[in-house]
Image (cartoon, grey):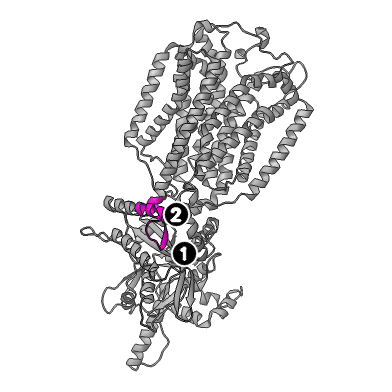
Amino acid sequence: MWDAVSAFIARVVSRFPGTSICGSVLVCLLLAAGLHNVHFEQDIRRSFSPDDSVSGYEARTYLEFHNLTVFPQRAFVIFVAKDGGNILRDGYIDEVLRFDKLMTTSLADRTKMSERSCHPLCELNRPFHLIMKELRSNESDADRQLGYPESTFHDTPLFIGMHFHDVRVVPETNKLEAKSIILWYFSRVDTPERKRTYKDTTLNLFRVSNDGSFSDLIDFHIFGDEIANSEMVRGALEATFLMSIGFVFLLIFVIAVVWRQSTLRVTPFLVTVTLITPFLATISAFGLLSWLKYPIYSMQCVTPFLVLGIGVDDAFILIHRWKHRSDIQDHSVRLTQVIVDVGPSITITSLTNIIAFGVGFFTPTPQMSLFCLATSVALLIDYIVTYTILAPVVYLCSDKKEYQPALPTKPTGNDFLSRYSRLLCSLNGRLLCGVFLITVYSISAVGVYSMKSTFEPAKAFPSDSPLVKSLKRIRPIFNTYFPVNIYVNHPPNISDAEQAERQKQQQIGDDLYNKKKQIKDFDDEKRYHAGFYNMVNQLETVEGAYGRNRTMLFLDAYERFDKKVTDMTRSFFLVPDQEYKPSLHNMQFWLDKVGNPPSIRYVRDNHTDEGRLTSFSFMVLGKGMAEWANRAHFVQGVRQVLAEHPRWNATLFDGDSAVLSLILTVGNDLIGSITATVACMAGICLLFVNNRIGVLIITYTIASICFCLVGLLSWWGADLDPVTQVDVLLATGFSVDYTAHVAYQFYRCRGSAVERVASSLGEMAAPMIQAGLSTFLCMLPLIFVPTYAIVAFAKTIFIVVGIGLIHGLFVLPVLLSLSVRSTHPPSPLPVKAEHLIENESNQQ
């Protein structure tokens, strides 16, 4: 059937070559017209967070709680003294305050009838300013006690661990000394003006931080969303420039290959079309995605060169076969025979690459997903234009003077190919293959076993970016204190009896509480851990959490305040003592006293009503979270506890939870994606290679290449992350290029195993090596791009080309030789369209 379809396509193309070329170019231009509406997505958060994920729901809850319409932009700044000393000294702290005033002034714009740009989180740095006020005050107040990581102001604990690091409290003076200060900033960016102001401010400060010209006393390191987006774009532009150098290498190589297969007169035309068709396919794919309202991410800058590296492979096969069929004088018949010969091979490799990237489209990371979709669509268009543009050009550029009588092609028995084929089919060749596989599997297994499942944000930026230094500076801070915000949308009623039990629990004391917590059959566990506080206690015991002393829940402080006010009122009015029961009657008074924090939503209908809490947020602190894998498990543990208590409708929020979720699932996702892709590859091969044993051998070889790839990537410094997942998926499609060609030709041939191996390698070895070298040259400059994601992609290409060629030219022929009988004459194997197979004996 495939031969008949290939013959039909060839007859149509040879009859209407000009129409085929013009029609294809016109359709591509219509698709490319969609680029007038292209949207370049530069938001790094959107590139990793799908809207329909759990993290997407948590983000929407966060926005709803703070009454935001768009996701805000955030930044943190780390200040250190240039001499490495205490940054809380006079002069040094003045420079920090000068920076803070500069930043807050730019974020404090108040347009008409709207809130400030930093609303509702303008008080993020309030603990820092309270400490600064206290340090500069010469008055002592019993209501104010400095400490670390918690100070006390008006009987209310104030956590300062997120603003000061490497702190020492001087006993003699009760003053603080710190090595670094951390300030946090927030902008709504809900108008173009605010977004532009925030972007300009952070980028200007980023440039100032790089040259160190802000102050003679302090240095600062800034990290912000807009800065991250800018650095990602810079990395993509660097990659594009270096890939252009790779294009030059590829151009030289293509000229050399095509020149050997054609005349000097037609070489420029064939080279031009060979290189232009992949770019035309890529532009058309981008245009089609723009028509469909898909954004373009920075990662997709690799797509044109990736399609180019794959597209020239088909061109090499087509041109090589056209040269091989120079014994056919009629060019229409010659084109028909060429497409019949190479059509299945091109179709197999194209479909497998298309499907491999198509499977990658279902990865949860939007940036990687659309990269795979764009590449898959581009490869599909490139596959079509190979027949509708490249084949007609080859047909039109050929001269009838090229006709040459058929020459003997059967191995003489003494050439290198014949000797190599006999080696592959011999016992020595099989033993050598076994030793090679055992060795490479052992090395790969160690690499797979030691691969770490994690993801660092620095991987998204060039390694020479100052952002990498900022992220390195924040690591010890997250190792000490890492906050996770919990948003409670159905708060408890603290007036019920449950709260009295909480007070009793607190009166027990921490030591007794911890002892009782360890007793599994403690009879009063439900009594002391009921309802909402049961959920809080479980959160405090999640692996990585600090515990109950570091849970920043306002209810404890309020209940102490409420009890104090209640006791004073009773004493004033001589009310008899009775058991204290919490209430919300004093909530508004307490909120006014602590500055009405935006984390508490309290409404009161009238002065006699105690009011009610509509929602609030609190913070659970973790430790040892510099490693993102630890953060991922901590966040997931918190998420599971919240899911066990749906009564409170509580959700967590972490700005990086989308990436953290990927870390937890990337291993299973990778195995599932590889399995699905390999199964699809096997199904496609079964359509063209009508031999089940052969399909099993091809499937095994593909799986072998993927396994070796993952292991060797681990040895080369790769982690198990979404980048590796996508890279392995595309490598799965690449691996078919080094297996399907040889296997298809092997089962089309007749004769002994040696003859079949020699014939298949004689047909496909040269195009496979040329294809591998062209892909290698195109991607070679990427190894010098200082961005992990792009370098990992280049490493994947290099490994899969090397391992793929070894499997395709050595391992696969050995395995295929085992699937046929060595006796003469050989039993005919089920092949397709045998009447179209070249009869080598007749050519002699």
User: SS for tag 2?
Assistant: helix
On residue 380, which mark appears?
none
Query: In this figure, what is the number of numbered marks?
Result: 2
> Between marks 1 and 2, how big is the CA–CA gap?
42 Å
Q: Is residue 734 left or right of residue 177?
A: right
User: SS for tag 1?
Assistant: loop
Q: Is residue 221 one of those drawn in magenta?
A: yes
Residue type (three-letter) at the residue carrying disc 2: Ser
Residue 160, above or below 655: below
Q: Is residue 683 left or right of residue 136?
A: right
- Where does the image place residue 506, in percent across and percent down from the top left? 49, 80
Residue identified by numbered label 1: 83
Residue type (three-letter) at the residue carrying disc 1: Asp
- Where does the image place residue 824, in percent across and percent down from the top left? 77, 16
Quarter placement of the N terminus? top right
Decide: few, some or many residues near mark 1? Use Cα within 10 Å; few <14, some 14-19, many ≥20: few
